[in-house]
Each structure stands twice: as structure tokens, then as C-alpha cells.
Amino acid sequence: MKRNIKKTEVYDKVLAYAERRAEEESAKMFSEVREKDWEVIKMSDENDQPIRLAIFEFTKKDGSIIYSVSDEEGYLFSPANGEIKLTNIDLQPLNKKSEVITGLKESKGYFKILEHAKKYASKNNVKYYSPNFYKHWDLSQMSNKQGDPFKFSVFHFTFPDGTVVYSVTDEDGYLFIPPSDEGATISGIEEEPLSFNNQFKTYAMIGGVILILLMSIFGPSLANYLRAKNDPLRKAHISAAKSFNSAREKLLFDWQKQEKDLGSFYVYTNDTVSEIWATMRPNLEFYENKNDISYVASQGHASTMEQFLKRKDTAGYNVILNSASKKIPLMKMTKLDEEQKFIYKNRYYYTDKEKAALTSRIEKKPDRKFRYPYDSKEDQLSALEGEQRSKIIFTESELEDQEVKDNLRMLFAPRVRKKGVKGIFYFTFYNKNMSKEDLNAKIQDFENMFFKGVSPKGSVLKKIDLKRTAPSI
């Protein structure tokens, strides 16, 4: 039998809040018409407690976001497709600026007893239950010997260290209680204090009799009352989402700091495109397996981000040049490299004369490994029509000595031409930012090394601004 979502007054409040947020953030709300393959499941935390009245954020492969809201028992619509990932959970969304305990029946009588508890907690120098401080407490129902609920009552919980916390019930006797492993005991009950002229009724806990009675009524522990036995895969989903969100938050903090530190930089180039900007990304790659269950993928991504943060000084951040028509990876900013490095990139196209000569060479000697050792003859011929790319990374000492000591690097470097550069070139630092003055002082050595001392036509030292965007991971 298909389980339906229990739509209560509080659920509708959370749903309305989620709908407003979805509209503000260009996200979508779950729709039974659109998401026909989604199924109703129960979400629980690591303590087997249902995640009640929360907003679950699911992200599709195209980056679009869908919100789904859980009811008072933790049930919600969830994707059956493993490619749609759970990326965030907003717990108690209605409690952002207040201490209203979402999920209890928030009637006038409840708020009155809550104010009463706050007042006497302050007067007696004790604490009262707040979801902001006791997020791990469990929802349970309290009844007397006759089975009638303790409605609008104040329960006093005393901990082994002497701390006392008040928690109040709603009209059905529901309240939040501490987990059994914390060793708290019920040291007092104010039964409907506002209805009985605030007469405090103390129920002494001699030998733990009342506690034992409650235990016998509610099962092995008060905390386990009303708990459902949940699918362990659901708990794995929650754990993976928490790990992912935690790692992502740390990464974004460091990422934005790196962007702020770099700010802008200079590139010596003959690129005439008026609008060029830079973006920065961490030097990491996520392994994607389409057959992975979504929580396995989330956990894997969390691990990748954590590992990057541990070695970020050597892994570095990649800086990419952008324009309306191209993206050019340019730098890898690191902190552990002691010597300053530079990069020279060249992009160009073969002339008709060059293509004719190279085509003839390929056709005459089809078995010769011309450009790509494993390319077919057809691929080699096709590559002649595309943009040709070459680059070299070299050290400051090599620039001063006018010699690259590694022949293999020179093999793939842009050609040194007597008539200057061909196509578009870019020259700048590679691993550590340099001031405009310091980079400008290196240009003559660079031109002597690669352009025979000739300044390419139209070349300028161009300022590039780093475009700081909200990174998406």
C-alpha cells in the first residue's frame, strides 16, 4: 500500500516556506505530475530519529535543484533514480529566527505553557528545551497511569552533572526528551500548571519507580518510543549528505579566499579580444560512475574534497582565461614551489602552404608517426585543419640563462621563429603572482629567448581581472 504524505498545518507552513525559497533561488518544488518515478520514503538521522518537517534539496545532473518536504513522521517524496543526488537538508526551516518547536501542535495553550517554562527556568536559574541547543533530543509522548496524556505540562529533566532542563508538552502530551544514554531522570512534573493556579506537583523519583514505569510503557527506552525501524540505506544517505555538505563548505571557504588573494594579474599577449577575464577552480577531479548509488557518489565527492584540502598547497588552484569564444587554462597557483615559474602558450593555424606540405608528407608516409603516435592517417589529416596549440613552462633561472635545460619540454614548446610569433601568444607567471613591474622586467628576456628579440606586433601587458563567481560543486 502506497504511503501518503501527512499534510498537517505545520507541514503546510514548511511547504509554503520551501515554495518561497524555491522561487527566490530558481529551484523547483517536487511535483507528482512531473516527478512520476519518485517514491515516498522515510528519512532518519544517525540516531534512527525521523527527520521531520525538513526541506530536502536534490540536485540533478544538469545542476537544477528540486525541493521536497518531509512530514511530521519523516516521510517525503524521494527520487528513485540514483543519478539525482541528495545535496542538502535544511533542518527545522521555520526556526531560523525563533525557538518555535516545529512539529508539536503550536496552539495558544502550548505557547502559554512555553512562556511559563521560560519564565520559571530563568527564575530558578535552569535551562529549557530549545531546538537550537538540543537538536539531538527525541520526540515522545507522555501519559499517566490511566493512559491519559500529560497535556500542557512541564517536565523537569536532571542530568548526572546536576543540570536541569525544562521541556513542555503540547495538547496531545508530546514533548522532546533527552536520549537515554545521557543518563537524565525525570525529577519533576508540573501537570497543567496554568490550569491549577501554577501549583507545582512534584513526583519524587524514589528508586527510579516512575522512570521504570515509563520505561515499561514506552519500551526499552523513552528515546526509542515511536521510532520506526528504518532502512540502513536511508541513514547512509543522510550521513553522506552531511559529509558532502561539510567538505563543500570548507572547500568554498578556502576557494573564495584564494580568489580574493589573487584579485587581478597581468599577461603579456597579442590577443586583441577586448573582454578577457579569469576564473579560478581547485585542481581536483570528481570520479563519476553512473552505476553508483547516489549516497556512494556523495561520499566519494566528500572524500575528494577533503583530500584536496589536505594537499591544497601542492595541488593548487587552476586559473583559466575566458572570453566569449574560448577558455584557456593558464596557471596552477601553488604555495610550496620555491622558484618562480613562467608559462608561454601559443595558439595558431597552419597556412595553406604549410597544410599542403604536411598533407603530402602524411600521404606519402602513412605509417610514419607524424604528430600523434597512435593517430590514424585520417585523424592526422583532419588535425591539420584545427587550431594548433603548444606551451612550455620554465623557471626564472632558465629565463635568465636563456636556456631550457630539459630537451623534452623544448620538443613540445612553441617554435622559435625568426619572423616573430605566429598566431596568438600568452606569457605570464605560472605558480606565483607577480606585480606589473616585476613581470614587465621579464619581457625582454622572454622576447630574446623565443622571438629573437623582436616584439610581436600588437603585443601589450594586459590587466586581467579575476571574476569571482559563486563556485558550484
Image (tube, rainbow, N blue to C red):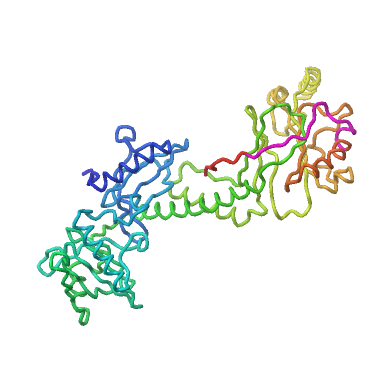
Q: Is residue 263 magenta?
A: no
Magenta residues? 449-466
Q: Residue at x 33, y 50 (%)?
A: 94
Q: Is residue 107 above or below residue 268?
A: below
Q: Is residue 451 magenta?
A: yes
Q: Residue furthest bottom?
A: 207
Q: Is residue 98 above or below residue 204?
A: above
Q: Nearer the viewer, residue 44 or 382?
A: 44
Q: Is residue 222 above or below residue 473?
A: below
- In percent of width and height, residue 234 lies at 36, 52
- In percent of width and height, residue 25 lies at 43, 38
Q: Residue furthest left?
A: 146
- In percent of width and height, residue 52 lies at 30, 52
Q: Residue at x 73, y 34 (%)?
A: 373
Q: Quadrant of the N terminus?
A: top left
Q: Nearer the viewer, residue 226 or 175?
A: 175
Q: Residue at x 82, y 47 (%)?
A: 396
Q: Residue at x 38, y 41 (%)?
A: 21
Q: Quadrant of residue 318?
A: top right
- In percent of width and height, residue 158 lies at 29, 74
Number of disc labels:
0
Q: Is residue 292 above or below residue 231?
A: above
Q: Quadrant of residue 137?
A: bottom left
Q: Is residue 374 left or right of residue 235?
A: right
